[in-house]
Amino acid sequence: IASNGLQELLNDEITVQDSSIFKWKYAQCNRSSNNQKFVQLKDNIFAIGDWNISPRIESAFLSGKALANYIVSKKQ
């Protein structure tokens, strides 16, 4: 479902190389020193995760959502 959504959003063919689901057991990460919800590593490579915001699973979701909103805003 996510792959199809990305293909539609980006109007490009997406190939998922690895996909897995896991149960979040412990949130013991340190927060990043920047105040961004995601980090742009290169032109089209980004790092997302709870460590960008706070050590909570909800923060991982919010980090991904912030990146999705950013990508959509750049496509318009």
Image (tube, rainbow, N blue to C red):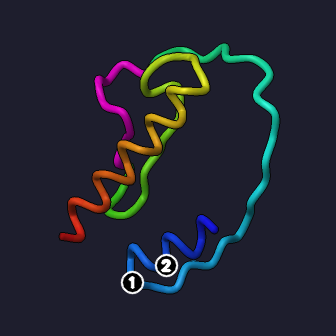
Q: Which residue is mark 1?
A: 11
Residue kind at label 1, given as amino acid type:
Asn
Q: Is residue 30 left or right of residue 43?
A: right
Residue 15, position as x, y percentages in the image: 62, 78
**Element class at badge 2:** helix
What type of secondary structure mainly makes up the magenta span? loop
Q: Which residue is mark 2?
A: 7
Q: Is residue 61 magenta?
A: no
Above or below residue 41? Residue 36 is above
Q: Is residue 27 left or right of residue 73?
A: right
Q: Are marks 1 and 2 in contact (CB under 8 Å)?
A: yes
Residue 40, position as x, y percentages in the image: 34, 48
Please name the residue shown 52% across and 86% down the image: 13
* Boundaries of the magenta span: 32-40
Residue 66 sits in quarter: top left
Please name the residue shown 64% across and 68% down the image: 1
Residue 53, position as x, y percentages in the image: 43, 23
Residue 61, position as x, y percentages in the image: 52, 37
Please name the residue shown 38% across and 39% down the image: 38
